[in-house]
Each structure stands twice: as structure tokens, then as C-alpha cells.
């Protein structure tokens, strides 16, 4: 971290150290003042009263609302992860195909699903599957969430696979061709395994996106963590506090996934010819995981 | 087939699809301004020599990048507006619109910050060293030497953030803003027989907005690239 940042300023001398220390204090004071204003405003409205927060510490809350909601969130996210990897593999390899028509179709499909908002797809599937009667009515929101996430994130993963293969050193492919592999076998046996290793950190970052986007299920009545938190908060009259806790749960899980991605990228960097940097690399910069 | 088409076209007399898209574009515009300003400020904090500001910036980015946008919007509307009674406009609809712009700005500022920071990383150390050598201190060096080059290097990630923001304006439905995704829901519920056509119209609308932005940023990032 320091390595990329201290580009901007020298090792500080005595005077600038004093200035920095003073500004440091100012920064802390500003943050404290901001926090004080918010907290005192909340306290004035009685939002910090124990009665608003204690319901969140009871077993009933977690057993009946938050844990089932979390389970529904994770269930949808896990299935979406698996399906979008499958989708990404098929269309990512399709975009690298030797056959121009296959490449063209896969490019159109991938670009289309990358451009359409996930929520629009979810609403489409929500109303579409329900109407077609493909699954039990109670399962419609679940499948709408999973399919919406699959098409969008699958398209992103297809792009990751494509750029992962393109970023490998040319020599890998040349060596494979020289020992007599056909281009498609070289892709499958030599390039893809290394590309997958190289893109694993970026893929884990994409899982963060999937997990976050399960919260869109709230809009199409999928009973995930946000929806159950909202129901709970509406019952107890403490939506603000409940949503705060729900957000913390999301932040915690996603932060752990981000840490895992950073660790993976360090751990895997010697196992591939490609670049594994997740957070700072050119690959990640282009595939902004918003 | 022609019956199907006339039926389908008659839908557009009833529902103003363009007006709904216009809401999304307005959300995009205001949230882009807000997140650009906030994101640049936080990026400046994160690369500054002052540890407490760096810590604040890092905390902001980690908090907002890892929270689902839906939660931020629901939190603002149900928690802050409904429960705390803080209103951003006396007009009922404008109030929701403003909350949605605020939520979108808060969320995307974290990504703008990271985009700018990745742009700063493309500036060679020699540039900053040269700036210091001619006697510029942190803020002048950042303003005159680093940021102009960093912004050019950050065009691609900034463009991606803008595209994501455009698509994410649909989430404003969670903040009770009537925009294209909620209009699409109403249209399909009213005319479920032409569901695929309705979906394709909305989807193509987004393709038409998003693809030119993508092409433009690719062109701009090449055109403005700093030769090294």
C-alpha cells in the first residue's frame, strides 16, 4: 500500500512532520465532530435508546428473521456463482473460438447481457417464469434472482476468461502449437488452465458483486436478508437499526471475500504465466466490479 | 403478426417509456456529478500524507463498496426519511428522487475513488519526483502534475463506473422512484402476453445508452493516453 502511495510525497522532515501531525489532529477532530452531530441528532430522536437496539440481540430475531434471510441470500448467491461460471466458460470459450459465426453469436450475447441492468432481467424473469408456470409459484422469486444474476455475471466472467487468455504470454500458445497440439487443444489444455488461475482473484471479486446483487431480490419479493430485515424492523419499529445490522452483515462477508481475493492473487502469482493482481491490475481496472 | 405489432405499439400510447428513461438519465446525470465530486475528494484523502484522512478514506471505500446499493437506498428512504423524518424536498416525488441521487452518489463515490487511485498508479514515480524536485508541495504537485495525468489513465475505469451507474439507476425503484424498471413491471403486469417484446424494448434502450458510452471512453482513453 505504502509503495504505491508515497510516490506523492517525500520522507517528511521535522517541519512537515509537525504540519502533518497538526493536520492529523484536525482530521480526527473533523471526523469526531461529524460523528458527534450524527449521534446526538439520533439520540435526540430517541434512536439510540436501548429499546430500539435490544430486539436485535434476541434469539427470536436471529432465528426467525435474520438467519433464514441470510440463508436465502447465500443459497441464491451460491447457485448463481456456479451457474455464472458455467455460463462464462461456455461463452468465454465461444468468443475465443476458431469459427467466426460462433465468435459473433457469443460476442453479441455477452455484450447484450453486460449492458442490461440486473434488476430489469430479474423483473422479466420474475413475471415471465411465473406466467409460464415453469416452477412452483413459491420458487419463482428465487429462480428470478438466480437467473438474473447468472446472465449478467456469466457475461462478465466470459469477458474475464477472454481477457485472461489474451493476457497470457504468447510463448505459451506458440510452445503448445510447436509440440503439435491443435489450436483448440492448446486453448483447453495449456491456455485455459493458466488463464483460470490468473483470473481467480478477479472472479472472487465478482462473487462480491453477486452477493451484493442478491439484495435486488428485495424488489421482486424474494425473502433474502434485506427483505427479512425490513419485515423485522417494520414489526419492531426500528427499521433504521435493523437495516444497519443487515448492512454490517453484508459488509463483513464481502470484506472477507475481498481479503480472500487479495490473498489468492499473492498465493497464485507463481502458478501461472498471467498476471493475478486483482485489486490494482489493468484487468480489474477494466472490469470494474461495481 | 401485424396484429401483434399494432397491439404492441398501442402500449406506447398508454405508457410513456421515453419519460421513464429520461428519469434514469436525470438520475445518472446528478449522481455522476455527486459521485465524481465526493469520489475525487476521497481519492485525495486516500493518497494524502495525513494518516487520519487516509484511514477515513479507506474506511469509507470499504464500507460503501461492500454494502449492496439496494440496502443503501432502502436505508435512506425507510430509515432516514420515514423513521427520522428528514426530508430533502417538500415535493413528494422530488423527495424520493433526491434521496435516490444521494444514495447513488454515496455508493458510486467509492468506485470513482478507486478508479482515480488506479489512475494515480499509472503515473510514473519520476513525475512526482520531478514535481518535488522543482519545489512543489503535496497539493500543488497533486493538482498540477499528478491528477491531470491520473485522470487520463483513469478514463477506462471511470467510464465503467459511469456505465454501472447508468444501469444501477434502475435500483432507484427501491427508493420509490418511478423509472424504467418499475414502468416495465407495470407494463408487463398489464400486458403479460407481450412480455418478451416489452423486455427487449427496455433492454435495447439500455444497450443504446450504454454501448456509446463504452465506445466513447475507449476512444477517449486512447486519444488522451499519455505516451510513456
Image (tube, helix red, strand yellow):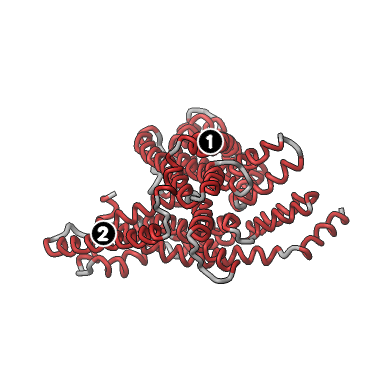
Residue under disc 2 on the same chain as residue under disc 1:
yes
In the image, is B125 to the left or to the right of A244?
left
From this viewpoint, which residue is outermost toward the bottom? B90
Q: Position of residue B46 (x, y in %)?
A: 32, 57
Q: Residue at x 53, y 59 (%)?
A: B82
Q: Residue at x 68, y 37 (%)?
A: A138
Mark number, residue B25: none
Query: Does A237 sit above or below residue A60?
Result: below
Q: Position of residue B11 (x, y in %)?
A: 79, 60
How packed mark 1 is, by other alpha carbons closer than 10 Å (few <14, some 14-19, many 20 or more), is few
Where, by quadrant of the figure, is residue A47 drawn? bottom left
Q: Secondary structure at mark 1?
A: helix
Q: How many marks?
A: 2
Residue at which label 1 appears: A64
Residue A174 visible in this rendered orientation of the protein: no
What chain letter is assigned to the residue under label 1? A
Residue A210 visible in this rendered orientation of the protein: yes
Q: Residue at x 29, y 49 (%)?
A: A1
How packed mark 2 is, by other alpha carbons closer than 10 Å (few <14, some 14-19, many 20 or more), is some
What chain letter is assigned to the residue under label 2? A
Report the mark closest to the observer, 2 or 1: 1
Query: Of residues A200 and B124, which is closer to you in this image?
Result: A200
Answer with mark 2 or mark 1, whichever residue precedes in sequence: 2
In the image, is B146 to the left or to the right of A107?
left
Q: Position of residue A120 (x, y in %)?
A: 64, 51
Query: Does A12 sit above or below residue A151?
Result: below
**Marks 2/1: CA–CA distance:** 40 Å
Mark number, residue A28: 2
Q: Secondary structure at mark 2?
A: helix
Amino acid at each position: 500500500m505504502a509503495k504505491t502511495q508515497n510516490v506523492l510525497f517525500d520522507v517528511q522532515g521535522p517541519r512537515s512532520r509537525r504540519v502533518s501531525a497538526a493536520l492529523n489532529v484536525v482530521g480526527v477532530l473533523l471526523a469526531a465532530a461529524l460523528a458527534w452531530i450524527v449521534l446526538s441528532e439520533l439520540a435526540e430522536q430517541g434512536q439510540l435508546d436501548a429499546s430500539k437496539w435490544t430486539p436485535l440481540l434476541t434469539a427470536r430475531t436471529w432465528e426467525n428473521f435474520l438467519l433464514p434471510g441470510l440463508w436465502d441470500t447465500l443459497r441464491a448467491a451460491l447457485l448463481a456463482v456456479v451457474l455464472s461460471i458455467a455460463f462464462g466458460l461456455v461463452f468465454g470459450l465461444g468468443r475465443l473460438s476458431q469459427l467466426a459465426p460462433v465468435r459473433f453469436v457469443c460476442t453479441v450475447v455477452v455484450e447484450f447481457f453486460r449492458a442490461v441492468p440486473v434488476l430489469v432481467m430479474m423483473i422479466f424473469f420474475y413475471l415471465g417464469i411465473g406466467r409460464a408456470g415453469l416452477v412452483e409459484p413459491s420458487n419463482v422469486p428465487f429462480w428470478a434472482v438466480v437467473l438474473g444474476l447468472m446472465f449478467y455475471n456469466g457475461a462478465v466472467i466470459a469477458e474475464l476468461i477472454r481477457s485472461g487468455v489474451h493476457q497470457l504470454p504468447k510463448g505459451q500458445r506458440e510452445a503448445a502449437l510447436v509440440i503439435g497440439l491443435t489450436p483448440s487443444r492448446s486453448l483447453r489444455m495449456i491456455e485455459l488452465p493458466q488463464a483460470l488461475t490468473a483470473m481467480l482473484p478477479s472472479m472472487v471479486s465478482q462473487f462480491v458483486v453477486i452477493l451484493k446483487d442478491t439484495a435486488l431480490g428485495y424488489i421482486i419479493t424474494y425473502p433474502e436478508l434485506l427483505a427479512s430485515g425490513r419485515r423485522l424492523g417494520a414489526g419492531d419499529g426500528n427499521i433504521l437499526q435493523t437495516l444497519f445490522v443487515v448492512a454490517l452483515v453484508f459488509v463483513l462477508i464481502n470484506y472477507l471475500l475481498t481479503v480472500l481475493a487479495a490473498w489468492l492473487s499473492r498465493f497464485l502469482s507463481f502458478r501461472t504465466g498471467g498476471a493475478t493482481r486483482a485489486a490494482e491490475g489493468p484487468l480489474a481496472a477494466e472490469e470494474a466490479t461495481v | 403478426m401485424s396484429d401483434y405489432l399494432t397491439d404492441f405499439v398501442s402500449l406506447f400510447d398508454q405508457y410513456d417509456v421515453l419519460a421513464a428513461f429520461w428519469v434514469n438519465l436525470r438520475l445518472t446525470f446528478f449522481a455522476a456529478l455527486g459521485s465524481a465530486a465526493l469520489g475525487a475528494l476521497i481519492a485525495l484523502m486516500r493518497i494524502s500524507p495525513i494518516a487520519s484522512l487516509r484511514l477515513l478514506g479507506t474506511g469509507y471505500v470499504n464500507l460503501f463498496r461492500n454494502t449492496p446499493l439496494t440496502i443503501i437506498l432502502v436505508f435512506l428512504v425507510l430509515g432516514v426519511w420515514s423513521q427520522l423524518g428528514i426530508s430533502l424536498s417538500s415535493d413528494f416525488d422530488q423527495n424520493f428522487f433526491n434521496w435516490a441521487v444521494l444514495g447513488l452518489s454515496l455508493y458510486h463515490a467509492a468506485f470513482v475513488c478507486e478508479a482515480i487511485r488506479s489512475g494515480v498508479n499509472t503515473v510514473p514515480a519520476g513525475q512526482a519526483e520531478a514535481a518535488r524536485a522543482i519545489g512543489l508541495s503535496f497539493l500543488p504537485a497533486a493538482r498540477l502534475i499528478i491528477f491531470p495525468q491520473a485522470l487520463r489513465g483513469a478514463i477506462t475505469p471511470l467510464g465503467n463506473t459511469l456505465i454501472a451507474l447508468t444501469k444501477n439507476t434502475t435500483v432507484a425503484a427501491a427508493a420509490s422512484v418511478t423509472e424504467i424498471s418499475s414502468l416495465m413491471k407495470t407494463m408487463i403486469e398489464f400486458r403479460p402476453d407481450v412480455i418478451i417484446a416489452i423486455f427487449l424494448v427496455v433492454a435495447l434502450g439500455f444497450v443504446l445508452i450504454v454501448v456509446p458510452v463504452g465506445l466513447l471512453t475507449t476512444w477517449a482513453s486512447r486519444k488522451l493516453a499519455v505516451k510513456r
